Amino acid sequence: MNLLIDIGNSNSKIAITKDYTILKEIHSSSKLIKKIKELFSNYKITHSSLSNVSSPNTELIELLKTNSYFFDLKNDHLPFKNPYKQGLVGDDRLALVCAAHKDYPNVNTLIIDVGTCITYDIKTKNNEYLAGGISAGIDLRYDSISQRAFLIKKINPSYPKNLKAFDTESSVNIGTMLGTQLEIEGFIKKYSSEYANLKVIITGGDSIYLSGKIKNTIFTTSNYVFKGLEYLIETNK
C-alpha cells in the first residue's frame, strides 16, 4: 500500500492507495503527524510520497523515511524532463505533470489546476515540462472583492445563469465566475496555437464550478495530485 500526502495552501489531504485506487482519504489541516502515525499503525504501508507547497516539515519527512520507502518530488527521478532548479516549481505542479505523463505520454498536454491559485503547466509531446502562469483562484477573487469593496459582503461562489445581473451578488458571480472561465479559455486558445493537438486537463477542488462549461477539455478529480504521487512511486521502485 502507498501513503500519499498533499499539503496545499489551504488544507492537507492524505490517501492510502493501491494500484491507483484510493482505499482511504482524509482531509485534515491539523494534527497531521498524529494522523500519519495512526495510519502506519493500522495499514501495511510500504511506500510513501509527499507534495508540500507549505513550509518544510522535516519531522514528517523523517517519519515517512523511517516507516516506509519514501519518494521525493525534489530528489527522485521524475518521468519527464524538468529544466527547473529545485524549489523553483511547487511540488503540486510536478505531481500534476507526473499524472499527465501517466495518462498521456508523448502527447502535448496542458494541465490547469483550479485551487487556491490557478496554475497552468505544459507537458510537451517530447515529455518536457514547461511551467506556465499562476493567477488568483476563485475563492481568492471573491475574498479580494469583499475585503476591498466596503459595501460588498462575502458571496458564496455560484455559476451565473446568464449575463444579466439583477443584484450585486449576481454581478459579482458574473464577473468572477465568467471572468475565470474566460481567462482559462483564453489561455487554452493561446497554448493551443503553440502546441499542436493539445490535450487539456482541468483539475483542482474548485474546478467543479466550471465542470462542463469549457469545451474540448477533460475535467478530472481533485485527486490528480495523488495519481501523480503514486506514479512517482511506481516509476522509481
Image: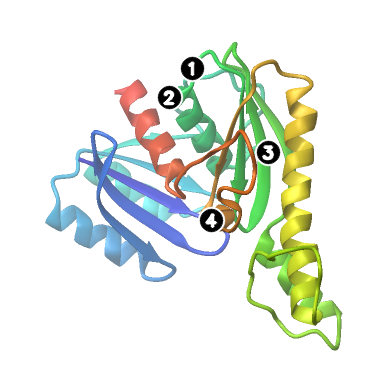
Q: Quadrant of residue 187?
A: top right
Q: Measure how far apart labels 2 and 1 are at the Cα level.
A: 6 Å
Q: Which of the numbered marks, if any, corresponds to residue 120? A: 3
Q: On the image, numbered disc 1 is attached to which residue?
A: 105
The residue at 47%/45% (across/down) is 51
Q: Position of residue 79 (x, y in %)?
A: 47, 20
Which amino acid type corresponds to the residue marked 4 in the rendered image?
Ile
Q: Is residue 173 above or below residue 85?
A: below
The residue at 45%/42% (across/down) is 224
Q: Earlier in the sequence, mark 2 or mark 3?
A: 2
Q: On the image, numbered disc 4 is attached to which residue?
A: 208
Which amino acid type corresponds to the residue marked 1 in the rendered image?
Pro
Q: Is residue 51 visible?
A: yes
Q: On the image, numbered disc 2 is attached to which residue?
A: 102
SS state under label 3: strand
Location of the N terminus by quadrant is: top left
The residue at 75%/79% (across/down) is 169
